[in-house]
Image: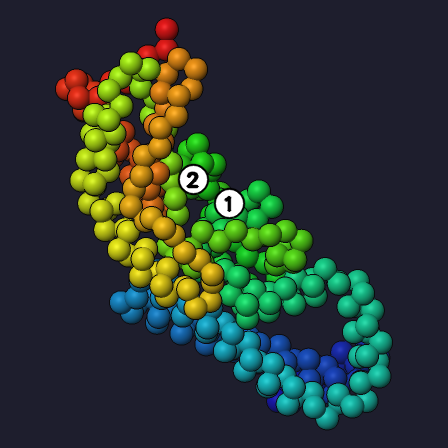
Amino acid sequence: MNILNKICNFIEEISTIKSEYVYLVFISLLIILIANIIRQIVLRLSLKKDLNSREKYMYNKKGHAIFSIIVFVLLFLVWSDYLKSFMTIITFISTAITLSIKDIVFNWVSGIYIRTSKIFSLEDRIEVNGLRGDVVNINKTGFDLLEIGDRVNSEQSTGRIVHVPNSIVFSYPVKNYVRAFKYIWDEMNIKIPLDADVLKTKKELYRILKKNATLRDIPNKMENEVNNASSEYRIYFNNLEPIIYVEIVESHIEMYLRFLVHPKKMRGIENSIWLDILKEYNQGKIELYKKE
């Protein structure tokens, strides 16, 4: 401590800053350093535990929050005797800072709103202001989306991380794909010749949809989720089973396969259905429209 006092006195001589304040700054930096070292040790120990990626992420976020609170309390105790004399100055400074960083403050307040209102949670798939993606991180001032493509590409991941400020939720509507339940309606467009046997084709397409193990279980799951969500949302569906609509378009017939699917499994399901349709086409059970 004698060495620290000498250092503080030396700094006071060359900078006119009182040694007691220099001492408090050193102690504060030491608290922050030790807290970070302990947090890193705890984090490394957690990585050795048998946790999945989500549990490790949440463990890290909670650990960071706890250590931040501890550091804040310790710093408050260290500086408590001097805070009263600083209060007037701090008030003026904080007002000036608030005006200069109002966007940051707004994003911070928006972050509290996101957490309390549960607009979306970690791993939810959302769309806001044309941005689509899975929420991979939520922090105090913004959130990160793992971007996905458009519906034409079955909304698959692009691999890009998009950082979005929290305040965007007050400027644009937020579409949550899994807020009330996990499944959304998907449609596939099948074109057949105008003189094709529509009833036979529908029968074959229904058979393809119903034999898909993943799609077969979804209506019952969806019914349970709708019932659970009915206390919070006025939502109901008359039909949860796959359905096929028919429409004549110019010189051919278009059949729309409508079915429930998990948004993250959409591309795989569509791929499986198309393979089955091509198999039926090659066996002569389904006719497909060929543009001349």
- Counting the numbered discs, the total is 2
Q: Quadrant of residue 283?
A: top left
Residue placed at 23% from the left, 35% from the top?
206
- Residue 218: image location, x then y, percent: 27, 51
Could one spot residue 277 in this view of the protein? Answer: no
Which quarter of the figure is the C terminus placed in?
top left
Q: Is residue 137 left or right of residue 236?
A: right
Examine the rendered structure and indicate whether residue 115 appears above or below residue 130.
Answer: below
Residue placed at 44% from the left, 32% from the top?
152
Kind of residue at badge 1: Arg
- Residue 179: image location, x then y, percent: 45, 58
Do the CB atoms of the residues marked 1 and 2 lie less than 8 Å apart? yes
Q: Which residue is mark 1?
A: 132
Examine the rendered structure and indicate whether residue 243 appears above or below residue 135.
Answer: above
Q: Which residue is mark 2?
A: 155
Please state which of residues 157 and 150 is positioned toward the viewer in this rendering. Answer: 150
Q: Is residue 218 left or right of residue 9?
A: left
Please state which of residues 64 and 288 is positioned toward the viewer in this rendering. Answer: 288
- Residue 169: image location, x then y, percent: 61, 56
The single residue placed furthest to the bottom in the displayed view is 81
Structural crowding at the residue carrying mark 2, measured as other residues with C-alpha within 10 Å and reported as few (<14), some (14–19) or many (≥20): some
